[in-house]
Amino acid sequence: MKRAYFIFNLQAGRQPVKVVKTAIGGDLAEIIDRFTKAGYEVTTRPTQCRGDAVTASKYACDSGFDLILCAGGDGTLSECIDGVMQSEKRVPVGYIPVGTTNDFSKGLEIPDKPLEACEWIIHGLENNTFLSCDIGSLNETRHFTYIAAFGAFTNVTYETSQHWKNIFGHSAYLVNGASQLTAIKSRHIRIECNGETLEDDFAFGMVTNTKKVGGLFNCNNFLLDDGIYEVTFVKTPANFMQLQKILVSLFNGQRPEESDYIKYFKTGNLKITSLDGHPLIWNLDGEFGGQFTESEIRNNQRAVTFVIGSENDINAVMFEES
């Protein structure tokens, strides 16, 4: 019998009471039963604190488990992937999204209901459908699945109280972010990539490999396994009209348009250096990712394998730029 290591976050999601109840019945018990019927001996590991999923997933890889199941939000998944990347044996991952925003799962077209996601994963295992995705690294010490960002509003996801996220869901992020509109500041940085160097002031920067960011940003021009990131830098708008134009460009479902306020390009590796005497504070997959004066980001192509429901789902998550 194959072995699955089931890592889940009881605090993830908009309805924590319902999620906690699954520990003694409901969805959690049903998920374990379904994977057992599918031929897996399931070992459970509820996370106890921040960073616990890193330790748990590395243990699963090092101990020879055949599958890692991760149930939680983007942050829990990011920790699981970080642990997988730290192991010499990288075990396939099945992701059951139960968080507040679940950006990465939208890119993979994973069902948003736990039991449906469970069946989706089992179907993929039975049909041997997998997708090896690019995973990013920051200064070779931290890893991320779909976004590394700094600057305006990037602290919103990890500074918004879990209590308010549980009550209001994604709206809690918007309220917290709106309160910071008057505090947008520029950072003087140097960007090195693709043999070129750019030095300028930017209020926000993000390196992405995803369809959505924060549940809002839409980008259909990306591939999950091409070794390339979509990189966007935004200058501080001088007035509300400029801010509005920037937001329209970012959220129009296409590649951000180059302008006096937006710098967009693609690359597999880049180095960002803060030149204003203060380190850049990074957000990795919605969680605090550390602060560095010099930040090197690298795309590790096809580094981690995810279970995908079917070949059709693999095709659905591949968005070629026209």
Image (spheres, helix red, strand yellow):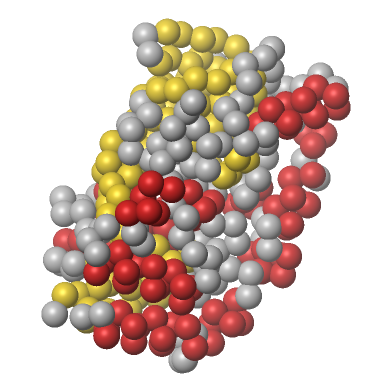
* Image position of 221 with respect to 285: above or below: above
* Image position of 273 with respect to 143: above or below: above
**Residue 132 can be seen in this image:** yes
| Residue 38 locus on image (x, y percent) | 25, 80
Horizontal relation, residue 141 to residue 241: left or right: left
Horizontal relation, residue 152 to residue 182: left or right: left
**Residue 205 can be seen in this image:** no
* Image position of 57 with respect to 257: above or below: below
Q: What residue is drawn where x is 34% and y is 83%?
A: 34
Residue at the extreme bottom: 24
Horizontal relation, residue 157 to residue 227: left or right: right
Residue at the extreme front: 312
Position of the N terminus, as image quadrant, is bottom left
Relative depth, front residue between 79 and 306 = 306
* Image position of 239 with respect to 208: above or below: above
| Residue 203 locus on image (x, y percent) | 66, 26
Image-quadrant location for residue 250: top right
Q: What residue is drawn where x is 60% and y is 12%?
A: 200
Q: What residue is drawn where x is 67% and y is 34%?
A: 252
| Residue 147 locus on image (x, y percent) | 49, 40
Relative depth, front residue between 30 and 237 = 30
| Residue 90 locus on image (x, y percent) | 21, 54
What is the tally of numbered marks visible in this picture? 0
Image-quadrant location for residue 256: top right
Q: What residue is drawn where x is 34% and y is 59%?
A: 310
